[in-house]
Amino acid sequence: MLDTFYISVFNYYKKRFKKQTIAIALFYINVLEISIYLALGSFFLAFANQMKIVTMSLQKFWLLFSLVSLFIVFKNWMRYNGKKRNILNAKHKVKHSISIIWLLPFACIGLAFILLQVL
């Protein structure tokens, strides 16, 4: 699913920004994946807090989140360079609306901050 979003952003910006297209698409997929993990992590942290389960402090949560974010950035950098992008581009048939694609990370971040208000 994330691959189709990456290729949709890549194909949309390929006509306008020739050299920066890869950087824009990589930035988008990093922000989207990090925001999804932030929403999931804040949900589980808020759920555990409401159930009175002692899991981890908020400081440890942010440290773990930053380490996961660094891993995601390096994983995506390795994954979407070279052959993988060309293979995905050849298989890509679905067109997504670029405005909805860019709205997804912001919706996940907003949901995460709403869930973090519970703490």
Image: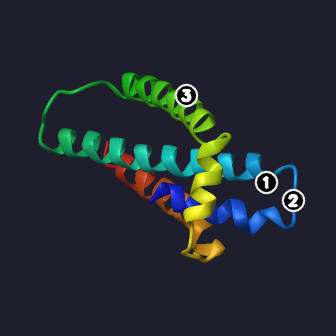
What is the quadrant of the N terminus in the image?
A: bottom left
Looking at the picture, does residue 74 appear above or below residue 7? Answer: above
Question: Disc 3 residue type?
Answer: Leu
Question: How far across and down, in percent of the image, does residue 96 sit?
Answer: 57, 75
Tell me residue 55's x, y (percent). Answer: 21, 27
- Can you tell which mark lies on residue 21? 1
CA gap, disc 1 to disc 3? 21 Å
Q: Nearer the viewer, residue 32 or 88?
A: 88
Which label lies toward us, 1 or 3? 1
Snapshot quadrant of residue 8: bottom right
Q: Which residue is mark 2?
A: 17
Name the secondary structure under disc 2: loop
* Residue 70 numbered tag: 3
Q: Residues within 10 Å of mark 2 (few under 14, many from 20)?
A: few
Can residue 45 be seen in this snapshot? yes
Query: Real-space Cα distance between discs 3 and 2?
Result: 26 Å
Q: Residue at x 56, y 73 (%)?
A: 93
Quadrant location, the C terminus: top left
Nearest the viewer among 51 and 66 is 66
Q: Amino acid at mark 1?
A: Thr
